[in-house]
Amino acid sequence: MALDSAVLSKRGLLSRMPLREAFVVEGAHLYGQLFDFEDLVTERGQETETAHRRLLRFLNMHYRVWDSLVDGDDGDRIDYHGARLHAVVASPVGNPAAQIERAVALARKLTEAARKVGDAHGFPSRIRFGIDHGKCLAMTTGRGTHEKDTLFLGRPANHAAKLVAFGVEQGIFLTETAQKRVAAGAIRKHAGIATLDEAYVETAARKYAFDSLDRTASAVASDFSEPMFRFKRPTLPLSSVKFSELSAANSIRMGMASIFADIDGFTNFVDQSIQRGSEAIREAVKIVHVIREELNSVLKDDFGGKRVRFIGDCIHGCVAEGERDDDAAGSVRQAALCASAMRSSFDLCLEVVQSNAAIDLAVGIEYGPTPMTRLGHRGEDSVRCAASRATIGAERAQQAIEHGGIRLGAVAAGIADPTVRKHFTSGRLMSFDSASDLLMTAQAPAVQILRSEPAARSHASPAKPTRG
């Protein structure tokens, strides 16, 4: 079904996404990428507390502007992830050209807002937008004490994100699908390259007011009472950290292994499910809920890790070892074991739901000092954030995997112990039993056997013959 535009304008997507329900939403998906994010992660090549404070102030400034979309002002902000924004325009229902026009206007307004607040606060403001159009499966996931995430799964969200992630030019760009559905005359071609006509963009920007966005940008630009980020070392395990208790003045920071676990092939699976109808959609919803909750449980309950958020069909989380001092090698080892446990749970989930979906698990891991806090609006609308070179590297490591498998980032591979480096740097993601046997963890089946039968040890002394 398509969401009713009248209800959408009054309440917004985020406020009306109940658990255990899903919607097929047709609309324009907009992804925005702040280009200068990575340059702010370090200070003279080092990830210092000063650099991280500046990075968080930069993100907080932009998040406050982007938060104005929560009010349903011609679009809905769905998610933040580091330097990226995901928004969707689902009205007017049944009019792809008008939806894309609104998304283009929103992108231009966000570009102007970024420039205004950036100039006022001395931050760079280069930004790139990608837009695709089509049907996605929308749902909310999370249960119990887990914070909820609104997900849009399918080709339009995925393709808009990729258009942003792999481009190097500022501006507003449309996928081939969006180009075919936009109004006539909106696209200009030069030397075989299709670009948006500037007159079309300016007309769209004048047509839609986005008053709340403009008001917020002006307020942020004139507000020089910047938050002071104060860091403390958390009490481990990370799973005991509550995002609801974090704020600028109560942020945490330590060496962490960042994990990105993506369901490879899920975009195609969702698209095929939407095409096949309601029964197939129910199957897709069931699978994603089961897998997501299980991966989150593995991370939190079995390995003491902390989920930052679900991003489409990916879970981003962190694990850390070292009570007083950072244990870099131990954190990477724990992350590798966590990835293998996710592999085993992923396979079990598919078996339990009796699915033959052509999907797999791809996990990227990177290590480094990482701050965790909440940004943007205070209270429930604030945004969970973990942003560092490690979070960037883990995501890139995951994106470099073809089909399923595991890959360590350069730092993680360099500090890992030899066994982890040999078996987890890149390649197939083994089961937890195999991984725990290789790393000889306390829960490894082989270790349990050796504990109960010491004679089974390969180096055990031969039994002395008994005398008759």
Image: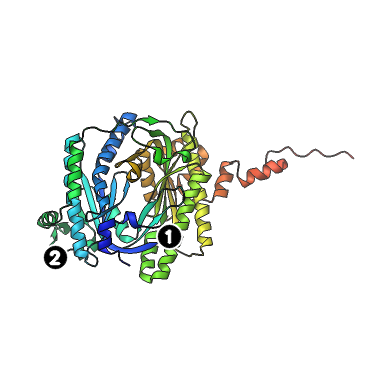
| Amino acid marked by disc 1 | Arg
The C terminus, quarter of image: top right
Q: Examine the rendered structure and indicate whether residue 313 appears above or below residue 387.
A: below
- Left/right of residue 424 with respect to residue 83 in the rendered view: right
Instruction: Answer whether residue 377 is visible to the viewer in this image.
Output: yes
Question: Disc 2 vs disc 1: which is toward the camera?
Answer: 1
Crowdedness of circle 2 by 10 Å Cα count: few (<14), some, many (20+)?
few
Q: Looking at the picture, how far across and down is residue 276, in whole percent?
A: 38, 71
Indicate the secondary structure of the residue bearing disc 1: loop
- At horizontal 18% and vertical 55% (from top left) the residue drawn is 104
- Left/right of residue 294 with respect to residue 391 in the rendered view: right
Crowdedness of circle 1 by 10 Å Cα count: few (<14), some, many (20+)?
few
Q: Looking at the picture, how far across and down is residue 111, in whole percent?
A: 18, 47
Q: Examine the rendered structure and indicate whether residue 209 appears above or below residue 440.
A: below
| Amino acid marked by disc 2 | Ala
- At horizontal 40% and vertical 66% (from top left) the residue drawn is 281
Q: Nearer the viewer, residue 442 or 304?
A: 304
The residue to which callout 2 is attached is 184
The residue to which callout 1 is attached is 20
Q: Nearer the viewer, residue 12 or 55?
A: 12
Q: Distance of mark 2 from mark 1, alpha carbons?
A: 40 Å
Question: Residue 378 is drawn in which quadrant?
Answer: top left
- Left/right of residue 236 with respect to residue 133 in the rendered view: right
